[in-house]
Amino acid sequence: MGNVNLKTDSKLPWWKLVVGILVALLIMVAAQLFSQFAAIPADLLKLPVVVAIVCQAVAYVVLAFLGQKLLIEKFFKISIDSIRIKKPGIKMICIITAVLLPAIVIAIYMMMPGEWTTLTLSNGEKIRIVVGALIFQSIAAGIVEELTFRGVIFGLLEKKTNTVAAAVIPSVIFGMIHFSKGMSLVSFIQLVIAGTFVGVMFSSICAYTDNFWNNALVHACWNATTFGIMHIDTAPSGEALYTYVLKTKSMLITGGDFGIESSIIAIMAYAVVIVVYVLFIRKKKRDVAKN
């Protein structure tokens, strides 16, 4: 891809880089764990569950941001702006990507044999699932994961190495940390491949826009289509209001144990987005060179 608006620092020690990456991952995990305490006051005051979820989501983002900011500015002694953690600035092309990526993937699945199932729940439970999916699993998780992987880890690796290595290495890690207990070897391999592609996709968006908020938007919109409200799988989900149950059992189509995010269809979609943004990056570099 090539470096875009980022100064390299070959003097950055490898030991410091590795320690920083590990700490960044720990900050993300710790932020999620400690954010649960933010929901306690709402529970004690018997406030609606929506309030508790919002409090937890806000705490998750704030704790993660403060932790990563402290790591970058105190341990690495650089500005967070230098690794693309800036004020929110969304480009129109990324809004289009955020809408089209999940829409096209879902449309392809809707053309496959399957049937809809619906969870029978109380209105309160439905609200809890929807709000949890949209506010915490989509928006908060999307922001924190992109802040950590495409902000801190990608940015630091890019300073030490180059954009391609910085995009691939954390993307493999990104795929591996989504491993879940009971996952088969084939499903795990699919997950790592898909995780690598989706990570490179987010990295490409970040490199082109020079602001992690753009890939956070795409990530959040993608999550919103796969959690809580609608789900596509080989069996009805107990955590989504509606599930489109596929009749095919092909792991290439279903994505195996992890789901359609690891499917060949999703991987091809990630690949298309990668190509588009790499072309944007090259055009941007040519324009900069001309000026």
Image (cartoon, helix red, strand yellow):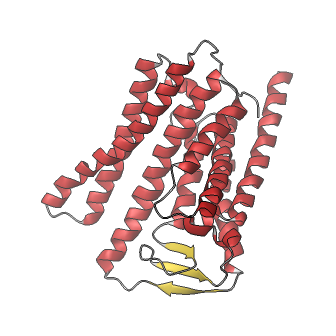
Q: Position of residue 194 (x, y in %)?
A: 65, 55
What x and y, as percent, mark residue 256? 61, 68
Asked if residue 92 shows in the view, the reply is no
Q: On the picture, is 139 further left or further right than 271? A: left
Q: Position of residue 203 (x, y in %)?
A: 65, 41
The C terminus lies in which quarter of the figure?
A: top right
Q: Nearer the viewer, residue 138 or 31?
A: 31
Furthest-top residue in this view: 11
Q: Specify the quadrant that holds the N terminus.
A: top right
Identified at 47% across, 26% down, the residue is: 19
Task: Kindly identify the residue that appears in the image at 57 percent across and 75 percent down.
Answer: 233
**Residue in the image at 67% along x and 43% along y:** 205
Seen at 26% across and 65% down, the residue is 49
Q: How many marks?
A: 0
Residue 255 left/right relative to 54: right
Q: Position of residue 270 (x, y in %)?
A: 70, 55
Q: In the picture shown, does residue 232 fall above or below 226?
A: below
Q: Quadrant of residue 123?
A: bottom left
Towards the viewer: 103 or 253: 253
Task: Find the residue positioned furthest to the front.
Answer: 185
Q: Left or right: 127 with respect to 216? A: left
Quick check: can you spot residue 249?
yes
The relative height of residue 149 versus residue 221 in the rendered view (above or below) is above
